[in-house]
Image (cartoon, helix red, strand yellow):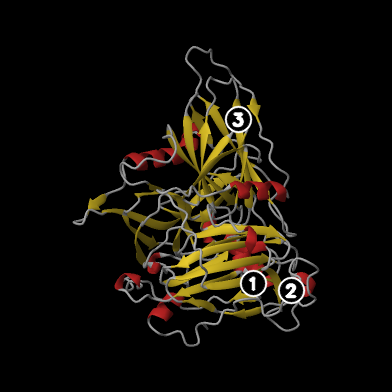
Amino acid sequence: MGENFRSITFIGVLILALCVFPGFVLSENGVTTRHYKFNIQMKNVARLCHTKSMVTVNGKFPGPPIMAREGDRLLIEVVNHVPHNISIHWHGIRQLRSGWADGPAYITQCPIQTGQSYVYNFTVVGQRGTLWWHAHISWLRSTLYGPLIILPKQGTPYPFAKPYKEVPIIFGEWFNSDPEAIISQALQTGGGPNVSDAYTINGLPGPLYNCSAKDTFKLKVKPGRTYLLRLINAALNDELFFSIANHTLTVVEADAIYVKPFETETLVITPGQTSNVLLKTKSHFPNASFFMTARPYVTGQGTFDNSTVAGILKYEIPSNIPHMKKLPLFKPSLPALNDTNFVTNFTNKLRSLATPQFPANVPKNVDKRFFFTIGLGTSPCDKKNQTCQGPNGTKFSASVNNVSFIQPNTALLQAHYFGQSNGLYSPDFPINPLHWFNYTGNPPNNTMVSNGTKLMVLPFNTSVELIMQDTSILGAESHPLHLHGFNFFVVGQGFGNFDPNKDPNNFNLVDPIERNTVGVPSGGWVAIRFLADNPGVWFMHCHLEVHTSWGLKMAWLVLDGKLPNQKLLPPPADLPKC
């Protein structure tokens, strides 16, 4: 495959999809239904001089884009042809009353077993922007991911100038070995898993890695044009800084929510988050090309992949300029790996538009307040007389309010809907830590976590305020928390321990950013508010996959309301069985 072809294939697929949506039908009530088919199949893929057989959608890596408009219905048939169990999550889609299509294995569905299929059936209600889809079982999302792009309704403009072109930029991680084997071994030994061998842009590591120059993403642009870059962080375990040399980016959207535009030379984006930025190219051919690079923002004490992915921004050479063999190639300057000040300043700039057309409907009155500690911990080894590779011979664990989540063997939503929850889960997730301590000071001597499958139950339409507090146990660390089924408003954040008497005075209830994934600051806290107006069982977890594997996850059970349109829809006939 030629170098140029490889660099534009992914964009070509997107532009083609933008022009010609895959087959659709117009139903009687005027709602457009779009049909997609995902064949989950093994495919040999080579990067960094390593070829491996890996799980893909339709043989593509990254996977194909899903394109829709606000208000469309999507029917996505997923057929499993691989030896692994599979489930797919449509990250950021509200799934109003359609929790059966949300995708996290053993939470809203049993996984799709080998040789089986399932049709994800949902409608995009009141959302437009850049989201994404990914596998939601074990570490399979390392290769199973792609863009989910929702255009505004026909005839509805963006709240910014229409771009000349739109381009997806998906960050990922490449492992020379099998990520399933990596996490399996780590969970057996209790130690930290091996880190990735490279970061990728649209599946390509770029020229800063050995044996990788041919696998470089190249974005070809024209002078004096505006491009909309749809950024998605699909990396497994790393928050990333991103910058394009000698160019300023204008942030216009985060997690498919329009924001007050602001300019920046560098972005930070956590796993699970998306961001739309406008790239205004230089007015004249600049006689140069420019690296676009990403590398990690690191706060924890564990090992990490300390490398840099690079793509190249290439300007179209005007016909009146003689062909130059080699143009200078400029590199951007990225923040230091641990530059928490930059991250804080950047996240504080993110504000909702809060206009009549795009209001920020922040819950002003709170029905229920919760305080969750978020962090690491330890567990004893599985076998007696075994020494594990975690701290002091234990196993690494992670928890919310010191409860490390035990994955059930039947889907929680099915158990709830059919009244079969006895023995599967308990509805008593703690509203605050059972043991109070100086969360960001010296950690307690006992770092052992408790274990359980506990849910937090909310009556329909409860307005919730949740404080998520990082802890210093095994080191303070930034944790990107993702809530399924809802967007939430980030009304406050700070460092140290949350002060319930002082900190709420500084909450932003006017134009806070609304999103589905938020970084809990390292050694600090974040406050969010949301309205529990979506019945079902909704997963909440750290989007660093290693922490999810260690148990940093829980679920909310939102009960049905009284009216018919406030109740969970019945399960589909083809819902997978465990």
Q: Position of residue 252 (x, y in %)?
A: 50, 42
Farthest bottom residue in view: 422
Inspect the image, locate mark 1, and give the three-letter code of the amino acid beneath it: Ser
Q: Position of residue 368 (x, y in %)?
A: 53, 73
SS class of the residue under badge 2?
Answer: loop
Could you tell me which residue is drawn at 70 percent across and 42 percent down? 335
Q: Position of residue 317 (x, y in %)?
A: 51, 20
Viewer-side label of 3, 1:
1
Inspect the image, locate mark 3, and give the three-letter code of the amino acid beneath it: Phe
Could you tell me which residue is drawn at 46 percent across and 52 percent down? 131
Inspect the image, locate mark 2, and give the three-letter code of the amino acid beneath it: Cys
Viewer-side label of 1, 2:
1
Q: Position of residue 566 (x, y in %)?
A: 35, 71
Farthest left residue in view: 28
Q: Mark number for residue 399?
A: 1
Q: Nearer the viewer, residue 411 or 210?
A: 411
Mark 2 Cα shell of 10 Å, populated few (<14), some (14-19), many (≥20): many
Instruction: Tell me, yes or no, if residue 1 can be seen here.
Output: no
**Sequence-first disc among 3 and 2:** 3
**Sequence-first disc among 1 and 2:** 2
Mark 3 Cα shell of 10 Å, populated few (<14), some (14-19), many (≥20): many
Viewer-side label of 3, 2:
3
Marks 3 and 2, how far apart in space?
A: 47 Å
Label 2: which residue? 388
Q: Nearer the viewer, residue 554 or 309?
A: 554
**Sequence-first disc among 3 and 1:** 3
Q: Mark number for residue 116?
A: none
Q: Nearer the viewer, residue 508 or 15?
A: 508
Label 3: which residue? 290
Marks 1 and 2, how far apart in space?
A: 19 Å
**Left or right of 440, for residue 168:** left
Note whether 41 is above or below 446 in the view shown: above
